Amino acid sequence: MLLILTQPLDAHADRVQEDLRRRGAPVVRLDTAEFPAQAEVSLAYDARGRARYTLRRGADEVDLRDVTAVWDRRPRDPVPPAAIADGPARDYLVAACRTFLQDAWNALPCLWVPARRPVVMRAQLKASQLALAGALGFTLPPTLVSNSPADVLDFYRRHEGQIVSKVVGFPAVEADGTTFGRYTEAVAPRDVGYAPAIRACPMIFQAYVPKQVEVRVTVVGTEVFAAEIHSQATNRTRVDWRRYDHFGTPYRRHDLPPALARRCRRLVQRLGLHFGAVDLALTPDGRYVFFEINPNGQYLWIEHATGLPISAAVGDLLLSGTHRAGIRSPGAGAAPAFPAA
């Protein structure tokens, strides 16, 4: 049995779930926001440590010991019952339920895609990604991660003002029902006057990389899918293709050099992941430059535009858990240290 943890409006999960059901695979999909108000989870152990793990929603009951693979796609925080209106009490319940679910999921000895939560959280750390990518032989853009105004100004001068800035953590926050995000931005001369503000919040600064095209490499297990994003075809996407101009930006399959494909696969493996979306730039002079890896990146728009069978590969990967039932995935229970290159 396969377990998909995600929210109701998730086209990626819809696509893979439909494919798995066509193949006859039993699939359970859970929105973790249903817990605890609409879902129950019980972990029971007898005197000899034999366990029983149960998920109930209404009249449906699932023996979680039958789960052979989990796709930790887009889970949401637990939502307490509406009757609990006190702010501090609700905050406590959210934290307690989040901890309990993490404990429950960690108890399942099965394949996790992209990986168990502690592994994913560590793999998202941008500076650590750059260090590992450099050790594996990727070309990196000159980079500074800092909250030092003096260091930022020195970096700006050394690169003659041709630098970009990025956030160090998650790019979006919610406030009053509105989501705020920040793209990669070119640092303009007027921004330099606000350099002292950097002391309050560290950021990532990188030398601007000229681009022929950008390359999105999606690694699923041992399979590698590469697509080129012609981000320079429109002003909107020149600095950050996530500003999406679907009508002005061509997307095509990309013939990734075999050695680079192996390096991307190795990066995902060394991070303890089974899935990863690697962002590269191909420069006008033919160099591939590494930007970052997203351990749970989106890919469906690439699949639609290029026909790359990424969803089918995700389904294959999840089904492979039936052949390794009882085997804990890399990093089970703890985030691994990155091995030496």
Image (cartoon, helix red, strand yellow):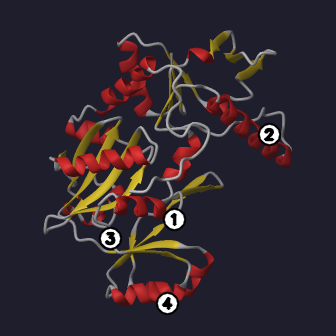
Mark 3–mark 2 distance (CA, rounded to whole Å): 43 Å
Camera-near label (1 vs 2) is 1
Q: Amino acid at mark 3?
A: Pro
Mark found first going from the N terminus, 4 or 1: 1
Q: Are marks 4 and 2 in contact (CB under 8 Å)?
A: no
Determine the residue positioned at 38% across, 46% down.
Answer: 268
Mark 4–mark 1 distance (CA, rounded to whole Å): 21 Å
Tell me the residue that label 3 is attached to: 141
* Badge 1 element: loop
Tell me the residue that label 4 is attached to: 193
Mark found first going from the N terminus, 3 or 2: 2
Tell me the residue that label 1 is attached to: 168
Mark 1–mark 2 distance (CA, rounded to whole Å): 29 Å
Determine the residue positioned at 46% across, 38% down.
Answer: 114
Mark 2: few/some/many CA within 10 Å (<14, 14-19, 20+) = some
Mark 4–mark 2 distance (CA, rounded to whole Å): 44 Å
Give the numbered dot on residue 93.
Answer: 2
Mark found first going from the N terminus, 1 or 3: 3
Place of residue 187 in the rendered image (x, y in percent of width and height, measured from the top left): 39, 79
